[in-house]
Image (cartoon, rainbow, N blue to C red):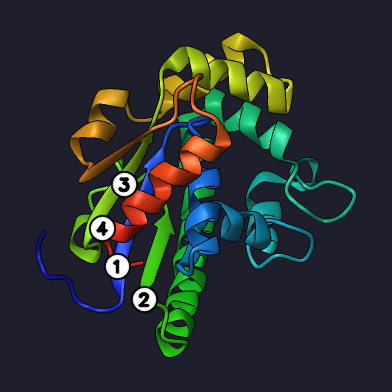
Amino acid sequence: MATYRQPLRLGLTGGIGSGKSTVGQILASLGAALIDADQISREVTGPGGAAMPAIQSTFGGAYVDASGALDRTRMRQLAFSQPKARSQLEAIVHPLVALHSQQRIQQAIQSGAPLIVHDIPLLAESGRWARQLDAVVVVDCTADIQIERVMQRSGLSADAVRGIIASQATRTARRAVADVVIANEAHCTLEQLQAEVRQVAALFGL
């Protein structure tokens, strides 16, 4: 394996329902600094979040819930039906996520973290990450397993989950950018997944 700079920067990605977030949590428990783009996005679109004034100005109060946060269900419906709305939302949220991510990266470096893991749902769709990462880990499973998991945890219909999967990079495209693939199929128990993640972590000195 190549010699990497310290701290190593690892990209973690996978389709919805793949178990990517669970893998990120396991890596964090092993000592990695986890930079979770989804979590940061939820923070900036939460009550009083930095993105909320622009969201309200752009989309109107109907897309802000009673707590002052983004109404995710209504916005999800709009974003999937109107690509322009999705682009407008991304133009508001993504720069803020990038800013907050950079702040947390600096904190991780200052704290001496040996590995920084970037949890990036749309890594395969974005061309900007390749230059910033030492390696990419993809959490992989079949679409049927994705649908089953998401339906169980969120209550979405199978068709709704298929729509989300169709809007993301294909399984083939994600695997094409991977340096390491973690298989998290239906038969994989949490203990087996933890063991697999520990093996991957060891590759990067964690």
Amino acid at pointer 3: Val
- Circle 1/circle 4 CB separation < 8 Å: yes
Q: Which one is in front, 111 or 151?
A: 111
Say which quadrant the N terminus sits in.
bottom left
Residue that protrudes farthest toward the left in the picture: 2
Which residue is located at x 69 percent, y 62 percent? 53
Label 4, secondary structure: give it.
helix
As measured in the structure, the alpha-carbon distance from the residue carrying label 3 to the one carrying label 2 is 17 Å
Q: How would you rate the neighbour count of disc 4 (Cα within 10 Å): few for under 14, some for 14-19, many for 20 or more?
A: few
Q: Which of marks 2 and 3 precedes in the sequence?
A: 2
As measured in the structure, the alpha-carbon distance from the residue carrying label 3 to the one carrying label 4 is 11 Å
Residue topped by disc 2:
114
Which residue is located at x 66 percent, y 36 percent? 75
Label 3, secondary structure: give it.
strand
The answer to whether residue 33 shows anywhere in this view is: yes
- Circle 1/circle 2 CB separation < 8 Å: yes
**Residue 55 numbered tag:** none
Which residue is located at x 52 percent, y 58 percent? 36
Which callout, 3 or 4, points to the residue nearer the camera? 4
Label 1, secondary structure: give it.
loop
User: Could you say where residue 125 lies in the image, as x and y percent from the top left?
Assistant: 30, 40
Q: How would you rate the neighbour count of disc 2 (Cα within 10 Å): few for under 14, some for 14-19, many for 20 or more?
A: some
Residue topped by disc 1:
205
Q: Which of marks 4 and 2 precedes in the sequence?
A: 2
User: Could you say where residue 48 lies in the image, as x and y percent from the top left?
Assistant: 77, 66
Q: Is residue 15 above or below residue 130?
A: above
Residue topped by disc 4:
203
Q: Is residue 152 above or below residue 97?
A: above
Say which quadrant the C terminus sits in.
bottom left
Q: Is residue 127 left or right of residue 103?
A: left
Label 2, secondary structure: give it.
loop
